[in-house]
Image (cartoon, rainbow, N blue to C red):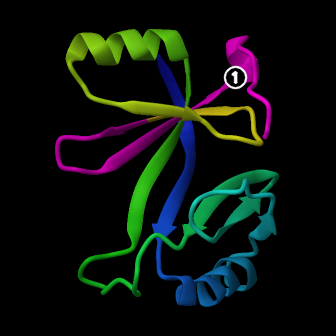
Amino acid sequence: MSVSAIHHFTVGCAVADLPVLRDFYTRTLGLEEGYRPDLRHPGHWLYADGEAIVHLNALLPQTPSREVNAFDHVALKASGLAATREALHAAGVPFSETPLKGTTLHQVFLTDPLGLKVELNFDLVAEGLAVPPAA
């Protein structure tokens, strides 16, 4: 497996937080709202130079306190999906995975020893694998 970059970070929030967060990241930081697949929770994907680097997801029933924090997970750009599966199995590290419908991404999810969610993003085209249909 090879990890080459941070792919995105996700801010977990309440539905009511989405407008103010979107405005902050677009107006204050100059990110642009762009394509977002149809996911379970409402949200926005915010782009810089054509890359969705901030994901705002209404994962929470209410606005998180500053003590709890809204950071949900970090996603890393990775390659070598088959080798990653083998390495994680060999190390006894539990993980789940899913293709992200409507994209060429395949996601692998795991948790670090302190409980931080880590998402590994593999580009199925770059891996030479078939991309599942969007629907």
Q: Was residue 85 drawn as part of the magenta stretch in this picture?
A: no
Viewer-proximal residue among 132 and 69 = 132
Q: Position of residue 30 (x, y in %)?
A: 75, 75
Judging by the rendered image, the residue that carries numbered circle 1 is 124
Task: Please state which amino acid type lies under the numbered disc 1.
Answer: Leu
- Left or right: 129 with respect to 3? right
x and y percentages locating residue 66 in the rendered image = 31, 85
> Is residue 112 positioned above or below 124 on the image?
below
Residue at left offset 48%, top offset 82%: 14
Tell me the quarter of the picture where residue 131 sits: top right
Q: Is residue 112 magenta?
A: yes
Left or right of 6: which side holds 69?
Answer: left
Instruction: From the top left corner, tell me how far across and down residue 72 is, in percent.
Output: 40, 62
| First to last magenta residue range | 109-135
Position of residue 95 relative to residue 56, above or below, is above
Residue name at image x 73 percent, y 18 percent: 126
Left or right side of 92 for 3: right
